[in-house]
Each structure stands twice: as structure tokens, then as C-alpha cells.
Amino acid sequence: ENRFAMLDRIQHPTLVVHGNKDVVVMPINAFLLATHLPNAELIMYPDASHGAQSQHAGRFLEHARLFLNE
């Protein structure tokens, strides 16, 4: 019934990474996911599509390191 109903049960820190020009999974879905996960951090890469992590590899690695060291 509510597709987000169980997300609040996930208490682990979660890094949501997305490209703002993704046409495979629309960017609004990243916002919705990050909103419904209690400990989520969203990074939206500009001018990136479905491969945002590889398109912004250096920045992504820096963000991932920061996230994992928190």
C-alpha cells in the first residue's frame, strides 16, 4: 500500500548518490529515498546521468571516504 512504509526501519547510515540528469531512474526518486530513510545523506551530482559515480569518480571517492569515516 505505502511503498515507503518499511524504509524508516532501516537505521543504518545510508549514502544516496544520484545524477541530476538520470533518465533511467528519475532524480525525484533519490530525493524520496533520502527523505524516507532516517539516516540518509543525499549527494546529487550536477550534469550526471545514471553513471554519476563514474562520471564524478574523484568527487564520489572523496564523498564516500567522508561518509564512511563519520
Image (cartoon, rainbow, N blue to C red):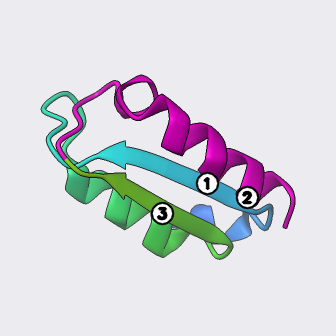
For residue 28, above or below residue 55:
below
Magenta-drawn stretch contains 66: yes
Mark-to-mark CA distance, 2 and 3:
11 Å
Task: Please provide percent x and percent y for residue 69.
Answer: 87, 58
Q: Which mark is residue 15?
A: 1
Judging from the image, what secondary structure is the residue with disc 2 in?
A: helix
Quarter where residue 55 is shown:
top left
Looking at the magenta stretch, what is its main secondary structure?
Answer: helix
- In the rendered structure, the answer to whether residue 34 lies left or right of residue 13 reads left
Type of the residue with mark 3: Leu
Residue 1 makes an appearance in the image: no
Could you give the CA–CA distance between mark 2 and mark 1, rounded to whole angstroms? 7 Å
Segment colored magenta: 47-70
Name the spot of residue 60 as percent of width and height, x first. Answer: 54, 41
Disc 3: which residue: 42
**Badge 3 local density, few (<14 within 10 Å), some, or many (20+)?**
some
In the rendering, at what x and y percent does residue 16 appear?
A: 52, 52
Pointer 2 with pointer 1, Cβ within 8 A: yes
